[in-house]
Amino acid sequence: MPTDKPIPRSLDAWLKQLDEVRLPIAARHHEAVRRALQDSRKSLREIAEQMQDSPAIALAVLRETNRHTGSLGEPAESLEMALNRLGLKRAETLLEQMPVLDEAQISLPLRQLQLISLHATQQANGLFAGRLARLWQEIHWGSLLFLAPLWPLVAIHPQLFEAWERRVLGRGEPPCKVERELLGVSLPALCLTLARHWRMPEWIVQGYRLLVEDRRLLVKALHIARDNEHPLHQQQLLDEDTNLRRWLTQPGNSILLANGLALSSHHNWACEHHLRWQRLTGLYLQVALPEMQQLVHQQAAQSARQYEMPDLWHPAEALLWPWDACRLKDLQAPAPAVNPQLDLWKQHCAKLLAQPSPFANVLQLTDSACQALQASGMQRVLILLADRTHSRLQAQQVAGLPDAAAQLRLDPAQSQVLRRLLAEPGQLRLNPANLAQVSALLPGTLKALFDGEHLLLRSLASNGRVVMLLVADQGGGEIGATPLQVFGKTVQCIERALATFARRGT
């Protein structure tokens, strides 16, 4: 279900877009689960097991259950618990509302990512569920749904998954750099935001919180795990760090470890990244590396037998064929010339430049202008319209800002900067060099919306009179030379659109 929706550049915009996505399910899974729900002989556990073959169904049921759980109530940690709370009738109604497609119509990146989640579940069951039998359900469902925040992303923007694979796995570019360029935000931070918003099981939130807010613990544990040939020395180091030792024994770490193993083996069984996850898992289980690798390989083979999908890449395949021979060459191939974000920006600019004006009213024009600015790389955008006397600025379009920003009204008489921008078309660029001087001359409500040290303000005229003020930034961070140039070209297109719109009917 790929779409032509603009690619957001801020956490708030991503949350809004991804929260609205309804994941598709394969027709065969829909029918199997429908029959299970209608079969009075099936137990809740049997129905839950039937649902796990379609991770999208499992996610939908868990989200729906936890959405109706009060803020003080504990979210359901397993699908069996979720079904018990939701009720089979409501689960059946929810199932009928989900989009159903033939499996071949569901995008490959989405199915590939869900296969990795299924593989992670097998790793978790084989490595941890037996040792922590009392918590097997939390381990099972937590490992399956850990990557769920990424599913809607690759469902509507599959090209991003392919670009990430090509650049990170194929070319070895730093993941953080690639994520920032493709998404505008950190991927773990986006996952944490969605997991909290969806009230996912606590172990999932805990795993992303570790990756985002407390990576030092993980780095310290990885450093100790590297010395896997000296378990006594490892134990001594853990004994010296009570906080680290306490964290390492938490059962919730099992789902992060299982997904780390699954994701890294999707890349390469022999790479250093996968070896780090194997060592860390060995430290967690107090198992020597050779034995750990044997266990992981056994679970991979079992996963391949259970989830046979010929058109997808299963990590177990790399146990038979070297990575270099089967996938690396494809991923290192030159990237297609198509840049979806650039193409989207060009489409919006073409609409703004169209003659005669395609806009029936100012609202349509400013909506197109806002989308063009977003596509140009601006993460937060505010478009204000000036009245005829320049006595008031009223918010017309908002992107990447709190909902309250849509009601913003500013009095230019209270700000020397606004008066100057309304006097004639011009641009003001805020940065650390002039921030202290200029910020004091801006309205407090505007500064509260755009926190950060970098900001662009641009006033635009029509028929010789300023009619519009654009305020935009890249999340408060530094705006480079290229984004600044693209912003300038976008503004030129908006100015042309204003001129064409003013001449309509003449």
Image: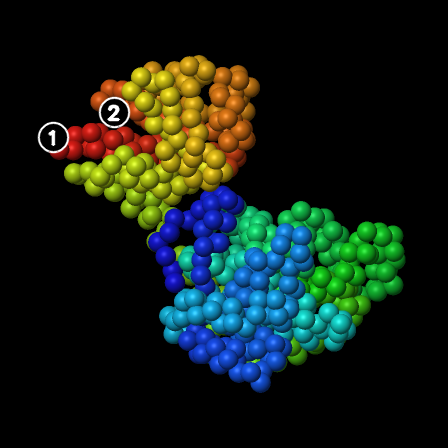
Quarter of the rendering containing residue 49: bottom right
Residue 332: horizontal and vertical position, in percent?
Answer: 46, 61
The image's colouring method is rainbow
Label 2 secondary element: strand
Give the answer, above or below, for where 457 lies relative to 207: above
Q: Amino acid at mark 2?
A: Ser
Residue 98 at x, y percent in the picture: 44, 67
State which quadrant residue 506 falls in. Answer: top left
Q: Spatial distance from mark 1 to mark 2, Cα to Cα?
A: 15 Å
Report the number of discs: 2
Which is in the foreground here, disc 1 or disc 2?
1
Q: Which residue position holds label 1?
A: 506
Q: Residue at x 43, y 23 (%)?
A: 410
User: Which of the 4 image quarters holds residue 48?
Assistant: bottom right
Q: Residue at x 43, y 73 (%)?
A: 26
Residue in the picture at 52% in, 58% down: 150
Q: Is residue 325 above or below residue 406?
A: below
Front-most of 306 and 275?
306
Give the position of the N terminus as an image quadrant: bottom left
Q: Residue furthest bottom?
A: 41
Depth check, front residue: 60 or 156? 60
Residue located beneath label 2 in the image: 462
Across and down, in percent, residue 100 comes to 40, 70
Residue 208 in view here: no
Residue at 16%, 38% in the rendered image: 356
In this picture, is 460 found above or below 146? above
| Residue 22, horizontal then vertical, whole percent | 44, 61
Element type where label 1 sits in the image:
loop
> For this rendering, which residue is in front, 322 or 181?
181
Q: Amino acid at mark 1?
A: Thr
- How many residues crowd mark 2 within 10 Å: few (<14), some (14–19), many (20+)? some
